Amino acid sequence: MASDGPSLWESINLRGAPAGRLQGPGAAVALADLARGSALQGRLEELRDRSVLLAVREQLTAALALIELDGVARRMVLCTPDLATQHLPGVIRDAQVDASVCDADSVPEAQVGVAVGAQPRLAPAATPRRNSVRTEWILLTSGTTGAPKLVQHSLTSLTAVLATEPAPSAALTWSTFYDIRRYGGLQIFLRALHAGSLVLSAREEEVGDFLARAGQAGITHISGTPSHWRKALMSGVTARIDPQYVRLSGEIPDQAVLDGLHAAYPQAILAHAFASTEAGVAFEVRDRRAGFPQGLLAAPHAQVELRIQDETLQIRSPGTATRYLGEGAPVLKGADGFVDTGDRVEVREGRCYFMGRRGGVINVGGLKVHPEEVEAVINAHPAVRMSLVKARRNPITGAVVTAEVVLKDPAAAPDGATVVREVTEACKRLLAAHKVPAMIRVVPSLEVSASGKLVRPNA
Amino acid sequence: MSVRSTITSQFQQVAVEQERTLAPLADELKLVQSGLDSLSFAIIVARLEDALGIDPFNAAEAVDFPVTFGDFVRLYENFGK
């Protein structure tokens, strides 16, 4: 698509050269230096009009590449740092990738087509930056089989909510526990670029070290999931920062974490936001109470429209994604433009409360787990007839994964202990840690519906 | 079994399962230095709810999030008192 609006770089220069910085754990880059600098070894022009796989380790490298590529690449595919190599071929096929931005030591599977090495620092740019296309931003989100789904956004949809807010009167310093290649982190990245500076987290960094670094940088605004914040509270390190604004998103916050954060930062605005990769940002609530006001549902002329249908929250806004990429991909939004979030909502006394996910998708500390993926591993055990994987509410990570298992021959394994141990070992070997059931129970039977499907609880 | 010994044995068992090296469990041990991660704590709290029948994190009144092992034990010992 031809360019019909400012690129990201043009957008952050609209009110003059940016004064902010991007700060990683080891290095920092002044945004203004990007006017004549490049993290892409001066090879940006080789990526023009291409579908570019962005597969770098460090967030700072990714941040610089995103700013450079928007308006140049036809499509950018934002690989999350935990993307398994086995899923790369599918992503490359579905996104029709013909170029890549990688680290020098990236796996060969990631170095596709025109492969450009990137670094978390700037070298002189070869040519002045030129905006020629409306770049598609492709975000990865977890799918039922373990393979990621590819969600198409644009800079316009990603900044839809941001664009309606007044510009801050003073420069802000943002930080986020999130990786900026996930939707929640990307929102903060784009906000920070238009408002000041950003302190980036690092995957292996201890929460206390990260907050110390953020505190030294003088952060004013910071976001994370309730699980990130519980970890900070339980680490006794909250005093290392003194923010004006604390945001929770990515999971449903309970009253305990809201109260804990209010006690830690009594002066700060405490906001919890609801957003999903597909539906975009729906709302932000600042009253420090779990759930959200029912009034948000009945605002037909609002930019973001919310409704409850079949007990689940649906959202229509300029911030929703366009579609899923790939042949045979599911439909992302209905004919009337509403995206079904799959999050069940109950209204009690004028307040809407989240009641878990329809279809049993489990959110463990902000990471989605599809029960079917875990069940497939469990059911591969020769002694297992069937299994049901479900969420169990948890005050530390929001939920943990549990499993109920029916044995083929219960008489042959009276207590099932050996099977449970072997199944656990198989799950550990084949699945990410947050997907491994915390508890496995052997049960005599599982409920099966008239249509022959496993009855899944709505939890 | 006392609340404390139930908690201690859950810390030890989950550390083994999660293949983490558990620091010696003294009251002053900071949880962040225990060797366990958030997922480990999540599993411990779920198992303790089964073993002790309580989830003090889900109390009606505001919770002081525990920072040390001693805080963690007291949170359970004092629940409902």
Image: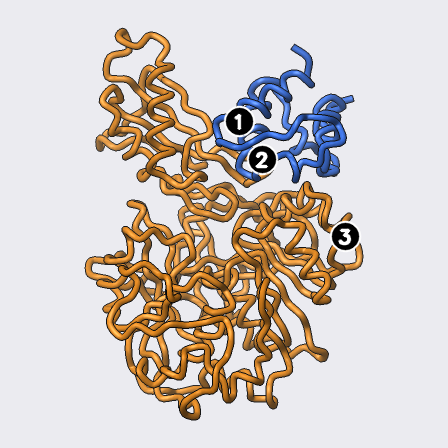
- A132 above or below A411? below
| Residue A139 as seen in the image, left or right of residue A174 | left
Q: Distance from label 3 to label 1 (Cα)?
A: 29 Å
The residue that disc 1 covers is B14
Q: Position of residue A459 (x, y in %)?
A: 45, 36
The chain under label 3 reads A
- For numbered disc 2, what is the local secondary structure? loop
Q: Distance from label 2 to label 1 (Cα)?
A: 9 Å
Type of amino acid under label 1: Val
Q: Distance from label 3 to label 2 (Cα)?
A: 22 Å
Type of amino acid under label 3: Ala
The chain under label 2 reads B
Q: Position of residue A111 (x, y in %)?
A: 29, 66
Q: Quadrant of the N terminus of chain A?
A: bottom left
Q: Position of residue A255 (x, y in %)?
A: 66, 43
The residue that disc 3 covers is A239
In the displayed orientation, state which residue is furthest to the front.
Answer: A105
What hue does chain B carry in this figure? blue
The residue that disc 2 covers is B36
First-in-chain label (2 vs 1):
1
